[in-house]
Amino acid sequence: MIFVTIGTQIPFDRLIETLDRIAPELDEEIYAQALRGKYKPKHFKLIDFIEPDEFEKVFIQARLIVAHAGMGTILSALRNSKPLIIFPRIASLGEHRNDHQRSTALKIKEKKYAYVATDEQELRELLHKDLQPLKKIGEFASERLIKSLEDFIDFNV
Amino acid sequence: MKKIIAVASIGGHWIQLLRIAQPMAEHYEMVYVSTHPKCATMVEGQKFFQTADFSRSDAWKLIPSFFKAIKTIRQEKPDAIITTGAAPGLVYLLAGKLLGRKTIWIDSIANVNHLSLSGRIAAIFVSRVYTQWQHLSTEKINYAGDIFE
């Protein structure tokens, strides 16, 4: 199953519509969580909110994740060793308040944490491949960050 | 044992917070605050409070949230308050500052080009601000790694 998730704040019709065009070419179920926009997909199920514990379950069942450049999803994919395709939102198309998703996507690609697609053709190519997870991360933040916080809380340094 | 209130909105902010707060639970009593009741299931056995979610478009909600934060901080008496954002976390830091608590803002790793607006506001009054990108660190803005590994 391919799990598509784009957060709960702003719809992302461009991604849903693009996926709906590619879906008939794929021999795999697509399940999408997206705040409803104007476009209704014909080839897969879309629900607008999944509660956090259910979200975790769907995530674990999925073979591949397709998402906007939201950090929560990127982290979940890395933690669960799921291959992830990021399709960043573009502010000038009204998909977000600012263009931080494009910057995030660039950095994520640079650090090889996930695959990134910016248009239909790139997304189609990635969806037709047997993608493998790029990296696995541990359960917690860097020890250095935790130590720095604890030193500041305990000793003010 | 010192006590810490850890605040974040549901989504990426919350996931980032857990990656920081969970290992800290070895040394501190943690109290969690988030914007969705279901977040409580991810910190079972630990104290959890819900706070309203809001952004710039419904900013009036920060007023009742602020008074609720004051009440929670008075009741829990934490040594420090940490948040990874967004706006509801900023409200907790402001309440914590007024009540003389240590306040820490950790800017989301999603902010690659510059600190978030909430982070820049936090930088004016909080005890310490962290960025998760080395190129954004300054004398006032600390960098000590990120929530990835």
Image: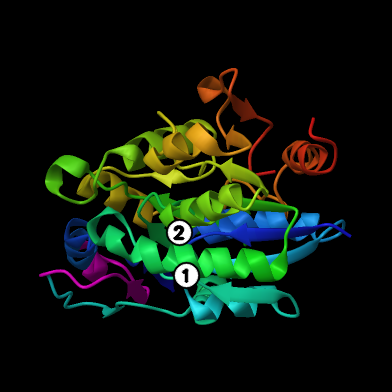
Corner quadrant of residue B18:
bottom right
**Residue A29 forms part of the magenta stretch:** yes
Q: Report helix, strand or loop for mark 1.
A: loop
- Crowding at dot 1, Cα within 10 Å, few <14 / some 14-19 / many 20+, comes out as many
How far across and down, in percent of the image, does residue B148 sit? 64, 44
Along the line of sight, the residue nearer the viewer: A137 or A30: A137
How far across and down, in percent of the image, does residue B27 sit? 87, 56
Corner quadrant of residue A5:
bottom left
Chain to which mark 1 belongs: B
Q: Please tell me which residue is depicted at 67% across the width and 55% down the height of the picture.
A: B19
Along the line of sight, the residue nearer the viewer: A23 or A4: A4
Q: Which mark is residue B35?
A: 1
- Crowding at dot 2, Cα within 10 Å, few <14 / some 14-19 / many 20+, comes out as many
Indicate left or right for B44 with B109 as reference.
right
Q: How is the image coloured?
A: rainbow
How far across and down, in percent of the image, does residue B53 sit? 39, 67
- Residue at mark 2 to residue at mark 1: CA–CA distance: 8 Å
Q: Quadrant of the N terminus of chain B?
A: bottom right
Q: Is residue A114 visible?
A: yes
How far across and down, in percent of the image, does residue A130 sit? 47, 56
Q: Report helix, strand or loop for mark 2.
A: helix
Q: Please tell me which residue is depicted at 79% across the width and 55% down the height of the picture.
A: B24
> Which residues fall within the magenta stretch?
A22-38
Q: Residue furthest top?
A: B139
Along the line of sight, the residue nearer the viewer: B123 or B149: B123
Chain to which mark 2 belongs: B
Q: Quadrant of the C terminus of chain B?
A: top right
Kind of residue at badge 2: Pro
Q: Which residue is mark 2?
A: B88
Position of residue B127 relative to residue B139, above or below, is below
Kind of residue at badge 1: Thr
